[in-house]
Every structure is written in C-alpha cells, then in structure tokens.
Amino acid sequence: VTLEAVLGAVGAVFLVMGCVLATIGLYGVLVKPDIFDQLHVAGLVTGPGVVLVLLASIGAGSAEIVTSAFLVGAFVLVTSSISTHVIAHAGVRRYGPGVAQATPVEGISAATSTAGAATAAGSRTAPDDRPPGGMRVVVAYDGSAPADVAADIAASIDWPAGTSIHVVGAIANDGVEVEASLRRAAAAMERPGIHIETTVSVGDPADVVVNETASFDTDLLITGSRRRSVVQSALGWSAAGDIVDRSPCPVLVARTRTLRSVMLTTDGSLQSDAAADVVARWPIFDLTTVRIATVAMDRSPAPEDQRAVDRAAAQLMDAGREIVTEVLQGRPGPAIVDAARGWAVDLIVIGSRGRTGLGRTLLGSVAGEVLASAPCSVLIVGPPPRRPRMPN
Amino acid sequence: VPEVIVVAGFAWCTVLLAIAGLALLRAPDTLHRILALDVLATILIMVLTTLSYLNGVSYYIDAALALALLSFAATLVAALYLTRRRQLS
C-alpha cells in the first residue's frame, strides 16, 4: 500500500463527510424558521462542511492545490466564526434573545389619548387635491372573488361628494368575460354625487390597472388580494404585490368588506409620515378610531420609537381624529400582524419605501411581509416624492 | 481520491448550491437573507474546490479564497449595518 493510496482514501472520506455535513446544515437552514436555530445548523456548512472538503485536498496529489486549500481552510475557520457572531449579534439586537414576541409594552406610552373637539374645527384645512372635496379612485376588477371584495369595500366606503370611481377590468389572453360582472359591481357603487366610470382593456391585468391608475391621476387604487400559488410564494411573488410595487399612488389591498377600525404603523420615516398624512387628510377616515403603533426592535423601546408615535399622533390629532397609541415589540412584520389580529382592525395603513425586484429580495420590506400575512385589508403608501404636487 | 467520488462530490455540491439559492429566495427578512447568502458563498467555495480537484489545477481554489474574503466582508458590513439601523421598513 503506497502513501498516495492512503492519502487518496482519506481524502475521499473527507470529501464525502464534508458533503454530508453540508447537506444536513443546508436542510436545517431551509426548515428552521428562527434565525438562531438557522445559525446553529448553518455552522455545519460554514464550519466542518467546507473545511472537510478543503482537507480532502491531501488526496489530490498536487502541492499547489494542498497549499491553496489549507490557506482557504485557515481563512474560513477564522471568518466563519466571526460572521456567525456578527449575525447572531444583529439578531439579538433586532429580535431580542430567543423567540420574538409581539406584546404591547405597558406604561411606555400613555395608553389612550383622545383628540378634543377643540382642535378639530380650527386646524382642519381643505385637502390640497384638485377635485374639491372629491377623490379619484381606481378599482381593479377581474371578476374573481378577491376582486368582489375590492368592489364591496369600494361600495361600502362613504366617499366624499365629487369623488370619481373608475372601475378597471382586464381581459387576459384566456378571454374570460368580465364585462357584465364589472358593470354590476360598478352599479353597486352608485351614490348621489359620485361619478362612476368603467373601462375594460385587453392585456395583462397588472399592466392595465397600473397604466390606467397613472393616466387617471389617481389618489387611491383598490385591488383584491390574490391567493398565491406554492411556486409563487416560494419565490416571494404575488399578483397584488406586483400592482403594489408599480402603482404611482397608495394601494388598498382589500380583504375585509368594511373599514371601521384602522391601525396606522409608523417608524418615523418619510414614508410613514406620508401614511399618517393620508389617514389625517382623507375624509373616508373621518369617523374611524385610529390606533397608531410602532415596533421597537430592540429589547427595550428607544426614545426614537416614542417620538415616531408622538409625531404621527400630533398629525392625526390636528386633523381631529380619535387615536390610541401603542409601542409593540418583536420583529416588525409579525408584531404588526399579531397586533392587528388582536385588535381586530379592518385596515393596516403602512408606509413603504417602494423597493422593487432585486432590492426587495435582498433587503426585505416590512410592508411586503405585512401585506403577505395580514388578516385584514392593507393600505400601502409610498414615499412622498413619488408624485410631485403642483402648488396652487 | 478516486475519480468517481470527486465527480459525485462536485455534482452534489452543485445541487446544494441550487438549494442554497432557494433558501436565499425563501428567506423572510434581511437577517435571514444575510445568513443564506453566507451559506451560499460557502457552498460556492465547496463547488470551486471540488472543481479544482476534478481538473487537478489550483486556481479555482484561489478564486475560492477571493470569494471567501469578499463574502466575509459583505456579511460583516450588512450585519453591522442592520445592527445600527433603526427603521422599520
């Protein structure tokens, strides 16, 4: 038995073991939902898995390969432990140690603050939008059950006089007839003082709706919430998400048929201010109680979190809204969804930075997460400079 | 190392690479993505290393070294950025 044969055999064993460990680790990363569990199993890949594969170089019979491989191995041994530490550190800062929880923090925010009627009369200015008092609304309708929910919510909202509602349908290539049911849905929205139009175009539904919304100078787009297929949800796609990403105006994704209670989420950012502005200004929220919530990502709420809530609260109280404020804890997406479920709100209003495509995949979006798992309707408001307003 | 084992190892690492890509796409938020990306880079190092054994040349491993360096820096910066950042969305 030569030395070469022995080294070859040992190398083969290392290679196989490395592959097996990497497989186990990767499987764990796929099935474990918690970041700390994932870090644990990922250590199998970034530690022993890759190091064993590199050690297998002793069987390769080339000095160059062995040298390079040992260099990489030494480097990986140092960096993988540092990487794991840094990710775990970020996880603790973000979610708190252990399992994330979404419990309201007692005593942090004064539980209830109600705007007096005194503020209501003076500071309520007329909306700066062009149609005096009225809104411009587009309802996306494709004849499906989710689209019916969108149509119902549009019919149930008490629109201000002068509002025009544009019901838009698309005939996709499969040629399903939507025109009759679209006219019926539009007829259900008819009220005195409200102007209703219908359009049916041929093409991809998302394209048709987004184009129509852009050309109509719309304030609000209402769309149904489509169920995602297994493949789509694995890849993080949804039809509603596509429309939300591309819409030039705020989008209401309808899952409830009414809008009696509203929850506004804020993080003190520009897009959150835009969301607060929408709730403060739009007459359709005149008679609803608004819960304002922010999520403290650290273990203890920071002053910034309270400031974010207070600023939104001031904005809404100026507009004469009744409000309740709350600071939540935990991972932002699940915390908001859990709170919405606990309070049984009909609508979550959330600002979105409006990232699309790859940016969203790599950086994540709380708005997208809320949209995907919320039990109620979601109103997504983009950042302010999306549509510059003309001063009068 | 017997040729057949090296070929099998290379093929299997390539499959793992695809699965790691799936894990990256399925990650629910930023921190999970950072981890998935780290795992993906590590598996890519494994693919390059087995490729190097297969062809009997060392420069694939040199590429793996550069990749390890870059992915380490990327993970570090992204995780630190996430730690410092406060905003929700």
Image (spheres, rainbow, N blue to C red):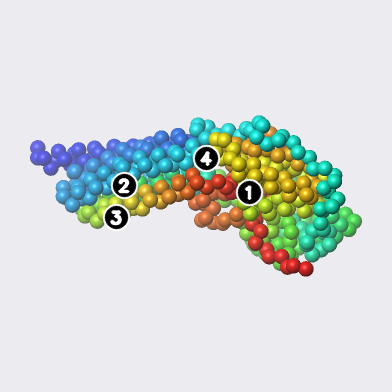
Q: Mark 1 and mark 4 in contact (Cβ < 8 Å)? A: no
Check the residue under mark 4 and report the chain it is in. A
Labels 3, 4: one chain: no
The answer to whether residue A36 is above or below residue B39 is above
Check the residue under mark 3 and report the chain it is in. B
Query: Mark 1 sits on what residue?
Result: A268
Q: Is residue A218 left or right of residue B24?
A: right
Q: Which amino acid is tagged 1?
A: Gly
In this orientation, which residue lies closer to the viewer: A260 or B9? A260
**For mark 2, does the 10 Å Cα neighbourhood hold few (<14), some (14 to 19), or many (20 or more) residues?**
many
Gap in Å between the C-alphas at discs 1 and 3? Answer: 44 Å
**For mark 1, does the 10 Å Cα neighbourhood hold few (<14), some (14 to 19), or many (20 or more) residues?**
many
Image label count = 4
The answer to whether residue A77 is above or below residue A190 is above
Which one is earlier in the sequence, the residue at label 3 or at label 2? 2
Query: Mark 4 sits on what residue?
Result: A94
In this orientation, which residue lies closer to the viewer: B70 or B24? B70
Gap in Å between the C-alphas at discs 3 and 4? Answer: 34 Å
Q: Nearer the viewer, mark 2 or mark 4?
A: 4
Query: Mark 2 sits on what residue?
Result: B46
Secondary structure, mark 2, is helix
Q: Which amino acid is tagged 4?
A: Arg
Q: Nearer the viewer, mark 3 or mark 4?
A: 4
In this orientation, which residue lies closer to the viewer: B76 or A224? B76
Gap in Å between the C-alphas at discs 3 and 2? Answer: 11 Å
Secondary structure, mark 4, is helix
Q: Mark 4 and mark 2 in contact (Cβ < 8 Å)? A: no
Q: Nearer the viewer, mark 2 or mark 1?
A: 1
Picture disc at residue A36 = none
Q: Which amino acid is tagged 3?
A: Ala
Q: Nearer the viewer, mark 1 or mark 3?
A: 1
Query: Mark 3 sits on what residue?
Result: B63
